[in-house]
Amino acid sequence: MIIISLQISVLASGSSGNVIYVESEQKKVLIDAGLSGKQINNRLRKINLSVKDLDAILLTHEHTDHIQGAGVLARRCKIPLYATAGTWQAAGDKLGKLKSEQQCVIDTTSFNLGDCQIKAFSIPHDAQEPVGYTITSCGAKVGVATDMGEVTDHVRAEISDSDLVVLESNHDLEMLKIGPYPWSLKKRVMGNKGHLSNDAAGAEVVKLAKSSVSRILLAHLSKNNNVPELAFLTIKNMLVEAGIKLEQDIRLDFAYQEEATPLYQLG
């Protein structure tokens, strides 16, 4: 008998909106709500759910592509929002007026939500107090680490024992350098508080593959500065060089902007 402890689907991932759905036996949670409420509900319907089923929304940081629908959903469906004090301060006007009981301020100590243990951890990004998350339930663990310029030792320590990690693979460095962005934006993306390149993501995948991580969803791919085939080839070559067998030692999948991933089951 297979016991499913956690399920996860990345409903959307990219610069136009980010939403991740995580479900335990008792709780249904979103990590970020960067699409409109209607779009989020449409994505949830594809996995036979509705926004009315949600128990909480966890916010990583205040950028619009992560919080666009959060305030509307919270008010309409009476859902509590969880975010750091810095994110609340930076995102308050964008989220709109919420009841005090919906404004849950968190730090980087773990807390329980039903049968889920949730841990926020600091990430290096150009936001006020950005975090990634791990969610653990009944022995299964999911890690979400996107929107960061580098993978610090602290981030790695938080996610390395996950069963599945959602990891950013934002851009190909050469595509970014010759692409249409102004130089100031290129510097921001390449900086240590920007976004991970395919090479940086690949180096991290190698390290995670040597720990207990068995599946990685590559996320937040740039439409202008990356293509999935290039990200996959870059990371595959790095795994081969490290003697790691794709599909046997580690599985790679992609999260996309326009469609939800399958509902991955962890147990």
Image: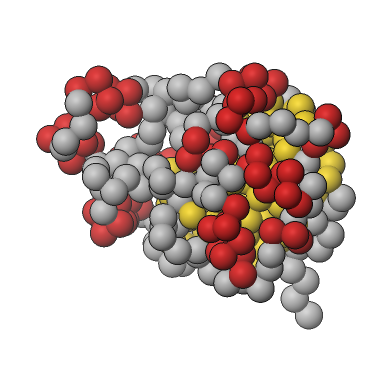
Q: Residue placed farthest to the bottom in the image?
A: 1
Vertical side of 259 occupied by 110: above or below: above
Q: Which corner quadrant holds the N terminus?
A: bottom right
In front: 68, or 176? Answer: 68
Q: In this rendering, does residue 118 appear at all?
A: no
Q: Please identify the quarter of the rendering in which residue 60 is found.
A: top right
Q: Which corner quadrant holds the C terminus?
A: bottom right
Q: Relative to 256, is 1 on the left or the right? A: right
Q: Residue 15 location, x and y as percent?
A: 39, 43
Q: Residue 85 location, x and y as percent?
A: 70, 21
Residue at position x 64%, y 19% in the image: 89
Q: Relative to 122, is 100 on the left or the right? A: right
Residue at position x 48%, y 40% in the image: 65
Residue at position x 76%, y 27% in the image: 105
Q: Relative to 124, is 58 on the left or the right? A: right
In front: 34, or 143? Answer: 34
Q: In this rendering, does residue 83 appear at all?
A: yes
Q: Residue placed farthest to the left in the image?
A: 178
Q: Residue 125 location, x and y as percent?
A: 47, 25
Q: Looking at the image, how many numbered discs can be counted on the residues?
A: 0
Q: Residue 11 location, x and y as percent?
A: 53, 58
Residue at position x 16%, y 37% in the image: 179
Vertical side of 48 occupied by 9: above or below: above
Q: Please identify the quarter of the rendering in which residue 256 is found.
A: bottom left
**Which color scheme does this rendered protein use?**
secondary structure
